[in-house]
Image (cartoon, rainbow, N blue to C red):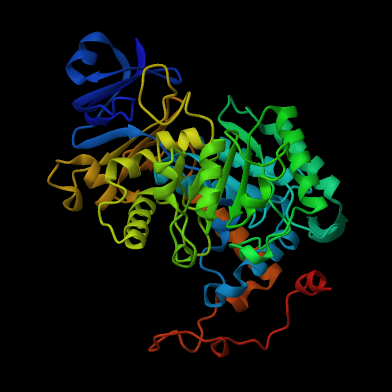
Amino acid sequence: MIDLLLIHGTVITMDPNRRIITDGAVAINGDRILDVEKSEKLLQKYEAREVIDCTHHCILPGLIDVHGHGGHSMFKTIAMESLDDWMPIMTNTYKHFVTDEFWYFEGKLSALERLKAGITTGVSVLGSMPRSDDPVFAINHAKAYAETGVREVICTGPCNPPWPHSFSRWINGQRMMKDVTYEEVLKGAEAVIEALNHSNEDRTRAFITPFVIVTSVEPSGPTSPAKLHSLTEHDLYQAKKVREIARKYNTRIHSDAFGGMIHLAVKDWENALLGPDVHLQHCRGISFDEVKILAETGTNVSASPGFSQIHARTPMIELLELGATVAISTDGTSPSTAFDMFQAMRKTQFIHQAAHRDEYCLPPGKLLEMVTIDAAKCIGWDDDLGSLEAGKKADVITVNMHQPHLTPEFMHIHRLVHQAYAADVWHVIVDGRVLMKDRTVCSVDERSVLAEANEEADETIKRAGLERYMKQSKYFWGHTRTYGDGMDHSMEEPAGEKEEQK
């Protein structure tokens, strides 16, 4: 007697042969996939405690979102009228105005959204820049994901200089501000990795995550080649310490990179944050020289689609053609990005087809690989995740194709990539446990999660004075463009912004 049998679906295995099995089935026992074959064969071969009829459904491996942010789910669309100031507004909020409990309630909301989108593994960088001055934030976030049942890679590490850095904790409603040294945030990150890596029956992992791989250049976009001189002492020290922590805990390195950083990083041959154990998000505006470095070093790359790709593109096609592993991420969910991997695939395809003026770039099969098996490789988890194969972890989703926008039922991968949405995910299984059945979440009380998230978000918004970033500008209706004079700048700056600017 086995635990679970999914039958009569179109099984998209993503195995090495990329098998697609019509009227297929997946047999699950414990936390592992036991068999993947025709329904007729597996019904004859196994008796199961639970059978789920997947007629009119695609059965495929759980989607993997290799880069997103813990915290952002509470602040969707805030400061969208002031996008130039979005990063400092959010960074200041995370540093000074969130409670310890915030990370638990936000984690529940984030995990729930990912679960309902068919994301069975999600990477979470804590805050807009990683925050690791105390391990409690990451521990609370990981606890929320564990309770929801979704796999999480929690990412913490140091943000950029100058040091020491000012952070706040809220204890019994009182704000406690402290200057924190670089060494203290490294110790905090170590404590997170020690507590969480391979915990929760290995559904939780923890990576060491400096904000960027080189701190002395532009941190959120490419740097002009004329300004690329040499690595600073802090750049060299950070790479050395990150490498030491990764080796000590046998974990991986995750960070952001932009044009120019890779050119500089490779100069530090001993400790460069490049290689098969490194996963770099964004890589926008990198030169072809840097593309070759990433491919030659086996560095894993991910990127999310968005307007910033127009200014400085991630050269996905070039990286792929040189043999690099490249994944699609959401970078969600703030200010305006959902945890919807189906939309992310479509947007990615459109951006790169437009950039290359070639509508044949990134065919649907490649896009699906980039959110399943290639994504698993990107985070070093492809031994267990990313495809439906006997012996791998039972992370499985189904997509309900019996809907007007997905009918008629043929060319299933084209349908999924071009026309499906997160809301079409019907069943979600992680580690053999059914977390969502018939679109109803089984692992947590969805209404309670939403109510608690709303309450915590409202309190945080008031505490941080974010209400002024939630107003419509005078150019909102009837205009084709927004300008800075459309916002009300008369309000006092929230406490904390002033401290940060001193």
Asked if residue 124 can be seen in this view, the reply is: yes
Picture residue at 65% right of the left edge, 86% below the top? 489
Image quadrant assignment for residue 346: bottom left
Across and down, in percent, residue 177 comes to: 85, 60
Above or below residue 470? Residue 445 is above
Picture residue at 67% right of the left edge, 70% below the top? 462
Across and down, in percent, residue 124 comes to: 58, 46
Picture residue at 14% right of the left edge, 42% below the top? 409
Q: How many marks?
A: 0
Asked if residue 109 can be seen in this view, the reply is: no
Above or below residue 293? Residue 36 is above
Above or below residue 183? Residue 472 is below
**Residue that extends furthest to the left in the rendered view of this protein:** 408
Quadrant, the N terminus: top left
Q: Which of these two is toward me, 464 or 275?
A: 275
Q: Is residue 32 left or right of residue 274?
A: left
